[in-house]
Amino acid sequence: MVMLEVAKAGLMVTVQAKPRTGYLAAGVSPSGPMDEEAFRIAQALVGNPPDAAALEFAQTGGSYRVSEPTLVAVTGGAAEVLINGQPAPCWESHLLEPGERLNVGVLRGGMWGYIAFSGGIDVPVVLGSRTTHVRNAMGGFKGRALAVGDMLTLFPSATRSPRRMRSIFRRPSGPIRAIAGPQDDYFDARAWSLFLEEPFAVSTRRDRMASLLFGPALHAARGHDIISDGTPPGSIQVPGSGTATVLTAERQTTGGYPKIATVISADLPRLAQMPGGLPFRFALVDQEQAEESLRTARRAVDAIIAEIEQG
Amino acid sequence: MVRIKPAGDQAVTIEFGDSIDEAVSARVIALERSLKDNPLAGITETVPTYRSLLVFYDPEILGGRDLTRHLEARADAATTAGAARARHFTVPVCYQGADALDLDAVAAERGMDPDAVIALHTGATFRVFMIGFAPGFAYLGGLPQALETPRLAEPRQHVPAGAVGIGGKQAAINSLPGPSGWRYIGRTPLRLFDPERNDPAFFRAGDIIRFAAISPEDMADLDRRAALGEAIVEAEAPW
């Protein structure tokens, strides 16, 4: 049995895996990684299949030890990663030997980092996934964030040969694209012009469930209460405070605030990783353009993963 | 009035009205059932709510525009005849002691005695409008008007699973322990959510339920049996 020891806990370190889909009608939040692209690349760098589990952290990664030689890779941004004090760059994998200490420092250029271990983390599959939902204490390692002294189990590694990316992973730049609605008609022309013309920024009130944005207060002319309906990822809901709030991985499955627009899937990882306080604007696209952007983004990550696998 | 709107690039929402209404809910459930019985390739998941169905799709297989056209046709064809197939349940509730958190306060606010609250609550037929807020949490319609009671100004930090509550015009059964501002008048031993079950949520939108008062002794017995994973409530023939 391969053991993974948490020698020092980072911030909000959770076991993450593909979203827990198929149970929305039962009220079960999908959870899953905040940045699915960085997560997929991390898994590929250590030779894991896409449904394996890795660690996600917020800003600070922590320190880890393993009981068998294990490939490790850190993605999501740029962090100072050290193995026994020696630099081990992000976005490529390195062999971590028993007795060595992996130290993952503060993430720059991102909010959510990923640490993948070859073999993947062995935690029970709950309703189809190993992802942790912290608020409901579901899945992952005991349904919670990791703490110092926790001992996790890894599946045996398929490979011990480090891997790297052949091309640079680039994200789109420019405005965060969104599709109007479903409650676009709750907002009048003034609210819409504020939404599309004023800058927004992610505030410090952000977690795996939602990000509250700094920016103009958006007044819903038809009121800030709707009959609760379903909440897709990227929903920009606006409660009575007027604060635009983007719903993310750990969102509740239904909500009672009007949703002015929905961030497109291709831009959700970028928004999740947006440094706090950095101004950005929203721009509207239609559903068809957004679908095309999602397919393009997926093919780009597929290509990077194919190159990693070719070695 | 049927209105279909994009809800991002992996979902569309189809609204059958803008009110909390049994007939509207029946149309939501009819469409959900139609999509289950005759699936359309590319639809990944549906979420029935009070007056709308959120339909998720995989844009690698199906475009939102085609899905919207398809749903327009489906929504007209899906009839509410299936309502006769709704599952019916009688849910045991203990309205005494520690399980009756707010019973006396609700009775006082409504100007009646606690037994009258229980009689109204057990005499009504409720419809599960939606599962949401938390895993397995059941939003119910059908609360007698005399029992409508506003939520607490300050939510309670801990409400047990199974607590049976009132929030304004709505009723609910709590599924997991946690904070809530609803007024809880009793508790059911039924486990509304259990990830070990095939259907982790006990109820689904469209179910019809009524409550039956049980004694604290029966409550203790049913609590014990439910903890062992025993099914303590079964679907009944429509009343």
Image (cartoon, rainbow, N blue to C red):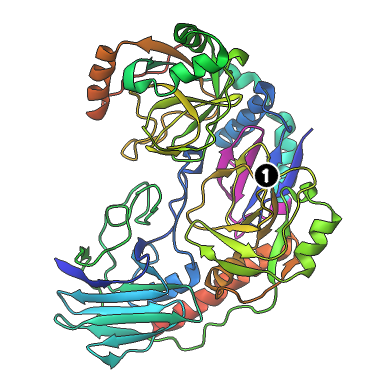
Above or below A145: residue A186: above
Give the residue drawn at x 27%, y 25%: B226
Above or below A71: residue A151: above
Q: Is residue B37 left or right of residue A71?
A: right
Q: Please say whether residue B53 is one of the residues in the magenta stretch.
A: yes
Q: Which residue is mark 1?
A: B13
Q: Please say whether residue A124 is one of the residues in the magenta stretch.
A: no
Position in image of residue A235 (x %, y %): 63, 55
Position in image of residue B198 (x %, y %): 36, 36
Above or below B98: residue A72: below
Q: Is disc 1 placed on a helix, strand or loop?
A: strand
The residue sitting at the right extreme is A189
Position in image of residue B167 (x %, y %): 55, 28
Magenta stretch?
B39-65
Position in image of residue A309 (x %, y %): 39, 80
Give the residue drawn at x 72%, y 33%: B16
Mark 1 belongs to chain: B
Q: In terms of depth relative to the viewer, which is nearer, B216 or B112? A: B112
Give the residue drawn at x 38%, y 15%: B95
